Image: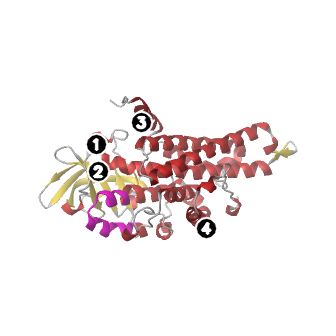
């Protein structure tokens, strides 16, 4: 379908809750996605390739570290602007949003929040422009939902730290110039280290044969006696709170991003239903089709309002990690269900690369798992409302 035909659904006039600046930012990113992403993303997905040529352009449109202060290369935007950017990028493809989300929330954010002034000046402007690509190392082969049990370790060797271990399912790993890696020190305390490509013993094998996020560059981070300079330690945080605070920022971005994927699927299905004629009338005239479409727009609208309110709370520095978990879980589930129902409306042609729905659907199967699985987020909400932990 022609990209210019896309019409963003806004059933409850949520646009009236946005500022003119929000709309300008969203419009600029939407135009870029129409021009740079949508024409090439299906082929990249089919070929299992990440369109690396888009990285510098993502920097130019302010998609990296949009809420990082201008003095460090960011755009100094608010949290709703960040959410809208993620929404538009994921309308293009989850892999593009994932790349920008990792760069912003999982690499730039911890360096800005917990790094030294020298680290901020050294890394953030180049990450913001896309000159450097970053990765975030937390998940391990045997420790996903339980990151506190990680096995990666580093020891103090005087003029450097010696890092050993491995991380798995890492977005940007094969192409990253730097990685923010979380590992335990000699006392068992979790700390953050900036590991640079080229350090001896540091390798990043690529993960292939994926049915989901095929145009995302995914891999491992492997550390075999890697010497990390002492100045690469993030001094401003100790413990699991560090990586979890980064994940809260990234999960917030996901909660907005998946709305974009859902809106793209819904708009595609709505247009198709008006044009596809069966039994002498468009399938949009049939009750079961209308039921699907009506339920889709209802759930999209609820997700839009949920994300907007969460953005307001984030701007006021009042959003809790549990509130972010609720929004991430709800909105990803919504988007996946919208994608599945949209594919039903398109019938057999819905699996074709001529339409974006199957690509979104397969991508969302990863999004509902990463940065906290659907069930883990449910238990986070449960713990928050009951005061009882189901994790121990």
Circle 4 crowding by C-alpha within 10 Å: few under 14, some 14–19, many from 20: few
Residue at the image position 39 percent from the left and 49 percent from the top = 247
State the quadrant of the C terminus.
top left
Q: CA distance from mark 1 to mark 2?
A: 9 Å
Disc assigned to residue 150: 1
In the image, is residue 318 above or below residue 227? above
Circle 1 crowding by C-alpha within 10 Å: few under 14, some 14–19, many from 20: many
Whether residue 138 is visible, yes or no, is: no
Q: Which residue is mark 4?
A: 35
Whether residue 35 is visible, yes or no, is: yes
Q: Position of residue 7 (x, y in %)?
A: 69, 57
Earlier-in-chain disc, 1 versus 3: 1
Earlier-in-chain disc, 1 versus 2: 1
User: Mark 4 and 3 residues: CB-CB less than 8 Å, in contact?
Assistant: no
User: Mark 4 and 1 residues: CB-CB less than 8 Å, in contact?
Assistant: no
Residue farthest toward the left in the current orientation of the protein: 158
Q: Main secondary structure of the magenta part?
A: helix
Q: CA distance from mark 2 to mark 4?
A: 37 Å
| Secondary structure type for disc 3 | helix
Q: Which residue is mark 2?
A: 182
Q: Which residue is mark 3?
A: 380
Q: Nearer the viewer, mark 1 or mark 3?
A: 3
Residue at the image position 19 percent from the left and 48 percent from the top = 185
- Magenta region: which residues? 108-127
Q: CA distance from mark 3 to mark 2?
A: 22 Å
Q: Nearer the viewer, mark 4 or mark 3?
A: 3
| Secondary structure type for disc 1 | loop
| Secondary structure type for disc 4 | helix
């Amino acid at each position: 379908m022609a990209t210019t035909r896309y019409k963003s659904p806004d059933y409850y006039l949520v646009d009236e809750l946005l500022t003119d600046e929000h709309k300008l930012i969203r419009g600029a990113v939407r135009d870029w996605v129409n021009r740079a992403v949508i024409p090439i993303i299906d082929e990249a997905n089919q070929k299992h390739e990440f369109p690396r040529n888009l990285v510098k352009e993502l920097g130019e449109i302010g998609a990296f570290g949009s809420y990082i202060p201008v003095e460090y290369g960011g755009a100094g935007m608010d949290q709703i602007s960040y959410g809208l950017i993620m929404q538009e990028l994921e309308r293009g493809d989850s892999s593009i949003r994932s790349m920008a989300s990792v760069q912003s929330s999982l690499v730039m954010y911890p360096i800005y929040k917990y790094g030294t002034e020298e680290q901020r000046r050294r890394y953030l402007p180049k990450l913001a422009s896309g000159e450097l690509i970053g990765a975030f190392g937390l998940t391990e082969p045997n420790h996903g939902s339980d990151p506190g049990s990680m096995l990666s370790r580093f020891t103090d060797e005087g003029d450097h730290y010696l890092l050993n271990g491995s991380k798995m399912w890492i977005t940007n790993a094969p192409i990253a110039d730097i990685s923010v890696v979380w590992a335990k020190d000699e006392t068992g305390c979790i700390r953050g280290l900036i590991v640079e490509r080229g350090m001896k013993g540091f390798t990043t094998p690529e993960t292939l044969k994926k049915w989901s996020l095929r145009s995302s560059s995914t891999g491992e981070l492997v550390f075999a006696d890697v010497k990390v300079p002492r100045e690469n330690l993030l001094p401003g945080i100790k413990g699991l709170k560090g990586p979890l605070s980064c994940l809260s920022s990234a999960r917030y971005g996901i909660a907005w991003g998946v709305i974009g994927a859902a809106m793209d699927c819904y708009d595609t299905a709505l247009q198709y239903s008006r044009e596809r004629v069966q039994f002498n009338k468009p399938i949009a005239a049939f009750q079961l089709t209308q039921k699907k479409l009506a339920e889709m727009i209802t759930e999209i609208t609820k997700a839009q309002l949920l994300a907007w309110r969460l953005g307001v709370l984030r701007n006021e520095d009042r959003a809790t990690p549990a509130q972010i978990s609720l929004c991430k879980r709800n909105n990803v589930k919504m988007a996946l269900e919208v994608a599945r129902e949209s594919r039903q409306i398109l019938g057999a042609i819905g699996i074709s690369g001529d339409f974006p729905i199957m690509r979104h659907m397969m991508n969302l199967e990863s999004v509902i798992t990463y940065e906290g699985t659907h069930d883990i987020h449910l238990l986070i909400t449960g713990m928050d409302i009951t005061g009882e932990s189901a994790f121990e």
